Image (spheres, rainbow, N blue to C red):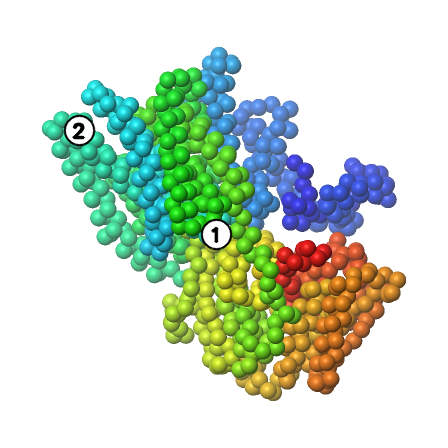
Amino acid sequence: MLVTSSTIVDPTWCPDSGATDHITSDLNNLHVHAPYTDNHGILHRLSCPHTSEQNGIAERKIRHITEIGLTLLAHASMPLHYWSEAFETATYLINRLPTPTLHQRSPFETIFHSSPDYAHLIKTGIITSSSVLGRLIGHDFFEGKFTPEEKLILTSLEYLSFSFYMFLFAVKTDLNVVRSAGTLTWFIGIACSIVPLAFTVLMAFLFSNNKEEKGKRILLVLLSVALSSTSFQAISSLLKDLKLLNSEIGRIALSASLLSNAICWIIRDISNFFLFTTSFHSSYLTPYLFKSQLSRVIVVVIVVFVLRPLMIWMTKKLSEDNATLKESIFFGIVVMFLVIMYVSDILGMTSLYGALFIGLAVPTGPPLGTGVVEKLELFVTTVLLPAFLMEVGRDIDFSSITLLHSLEVSSFVFVAFWGKFLTVYGFSRYWRMPNKDALTLAETLSSRGLFDIMIYRLLMKATIINVEAYSIITLFAMMNAAIQTPLISYFYDPSKRYVNYRRRTIQHFGHTGETQILGCLHDEDQILSIANVFIRFHPTLERPLRVFIMDLMDLRGRSHPVLIDHQFHKAYNESSLQQTQTSRIINAFVQLEIYYQGVIKNHYYTSITPYASMHDDICSLALEKGIMLLIIPFQRSDSIALRDMKKNVLDKAPCSVGLIVDKKIISHWNDNITQGRDQMSHGVCVIFTRGPDSREALSLGMRMARDITVKLTVIRMLVEEDHVTENSVEDNLDIKLLQDLADLHKVISERVEYNEVVSRDANETMRVFIALEDSYDLILVGRRMDDRSPLVAGLGDWNYFEELGVIGDMLVSSDMKSTASILVLQQQTIAQDHILH
């Protein structure tokens, strides 16, 4: 695989300077490789001579690969000359296994921003099955490979893996989302199950209209229920991979699929009751039905009245700040799960029902539900599930498929798919949903996934369907997933609605009226950083500030994203031990609102969604509320997922965006409150180069300068005349804004200072920034800048934080003497700007 700057976070090639003999005997000749590395965005750097400690990471990784490769060879009793294939396999496994270094994410997920796909194991199982490889070699490839005892262990392991998978699916399911679902969601959720089920059940009666075929009718009806159901787990996984979980279509699809799942489970039980009533003699039927229903009642009573209260008690014992779930509590949850499965099996009810009931009883989200998922998911998805998927493919038998029966089963599949698709599309269009959105929703709810294939295999093991039917519907599910995923990506792009034709920037906002600002934070330590920026806006009765605060929380331990509006939030007592991070954040900004009574009005939100799609919640709220400036704290210690989320916001935000880097240890906010607003003096510096981002920074600085406690310094960076690039539109806009600054200087000359600095190259630019005084409290700078400008030429190659821009990255580096906080601004780009440029 070719690795380039577009696929990796840090596109740097750092070979050992002592190992360059493998490349060239002369270090000066390394430039011959420059065309290749430059074309693929790879930076070539050498380690320092005689510093072997710089090679530790690479050497440890080589040792890791070597040990795993040799272990694979030894376990398979393979000769050493297969070391190349073994090491490739070891690298493949390492890249797809989660690691604590990446916060339990795999390298594959970190690079490509999607979970590893294990569906290829099904294809491997198909290839190695008796109907493919077995025909080529004349016998079953796995025949004689396992003893009867080992086969029994493998069968038990497969069943256990599906039970754990069902348990995790239930733990991550939040049933409360059904109550908040809208009318459209309820209609779609009910109709997308009832309509295809009605057609397929009618077909089942048509294909088995003889009295002798009642048994076949039972099997066809149960097959109809399986084909008409919409798996919540499969839809959730699909939307997560497509980064559409918290989109409008994603929320409707999740709620509708959960309703469809519940309806199909109920219909399946009712069908079993009536169908068994007409199929068996009453002397056998009565005790069977009594025992089956009694067993379910017993399991539900145990779960609801014994285990559920016990779990709630465990949750109360856990502190929210405890990052990890206690081993004793986790062990207790696993024991409950195994006991309920055993009891369900003893009572004659399938243990999967027990796994489902106990999973739904676990409180969703942190600390208990999230902790259980984080500890179990890694083991289930990387150890148990792959073995199950291999067997899923091996059970497909092409030789069992005949023309007559394949047409019969395919007709059920065809009717169920198109019945669901046309029903969802019709209801969506009736509710005036746009055509592309209706098509996307219909394609999503008619998709099939891994969970559906698991259900099909259980039906085959229970002899409800035969191998032929299993092979046909499993192949259809795989084809469905391969076709529907790219179609959904093509039809639906939620970011398109963020592109608008209206200016929402500080520069184009008038001097009077209410200013809407959105502050996003993912840690309560960032409260002061956000609050200090709000204070510097100098809100007054003529220019009040409407602030929207969004607490960002990663979606963990649940499948359904949540956007909470805390409109009627009640402040907690500060001494309360039950305060959450969100409540502490809200209480802090409530105090700020009280102190600035009448000029600052706050609104509070919490977004619980994956970081990969969190920008949708942020941008949607910014678009809905008419936000002019969106502020997000930036820290050098941010995880890769957080940085990717902030890059997505910068790319798609429908307003201007500011990244605040707080380098001050002292809290200006606290100083304001203790010493008084009118007794403090704050230095604000604007670094003005050229372009829309610099104009946004200068506009914000000019607004801050209207506060009598602020002294504004504007440093305009210029290049020598022979390097100036002509752009009349940009130059005219810059000159016009600088004229406004000159007018402001005439009014408050004692608090506004303007300097011009001429720089010949990037080295002089760097020296100017390093020489900045430490008297500034806040530095404003534009994010985007032409990399070809002599001011920063060559510095882009050493830009560690792309989201801060070249100059912003320099200002936050450890080489800077100034301890001022940095606010990096990016002005909103509208459709007209793309046309002009």
In the image, residue 214 lies at what x, y percent?
A: 22, 24
Q: Where 770 falls versus 118 (above or below)?
A: below
Q: Quadrant of residue 28?
A: top right
Q: Where 314 falls versus 389 (above or below)?
A: below
In the image, residue 374 lies at what x, y percent?
A: 44, 49
Residue that mark 2 sits on: 278
User: Which residue occupies 48% across, 24% down?
Assistant: 126
Q: Alpha-carbon distance for marks 2 and 1?
A: 46 Å
Residue that mark 1 sits on: 247
Along the line of sight, the residue nearer the viewer: 797 or 267:
267
User: Which residue occupies 51% across, 32% down?
Assistant: 120
In the image, residue 516 lies at what x, y percent?
A: 54, 70
Give the residue at the far top of this rendering.
138
User: Which residue occupies 50% across, 68% down?
Assistant: 548
User: Which residue occupies 84% across, 62% down?
Assistant: 724
Give the residue at the far left of this rendering.
283
Q: Quadrant of residue 297?
A: top left
Q: Where 570 falls versus 214 (above or below)?
A: below
Q: Amino acid at mark 1?
A: Ser
Q: Quadrant of residue 278?
A: top left
10 Å neighbourhood of mark 1: few (<14), some, or many (≥20)? many
Along the line of sight, the residue nearer the viewer: 440 or 348:
440
Question: Is residue 772 visible to the viewer in this orientation of the structure?
Answer: no
Location of the C terminus by quadrant is bottom right
Q: Along the horizontal axis of the image, is 289 left or right of 597?
A: left
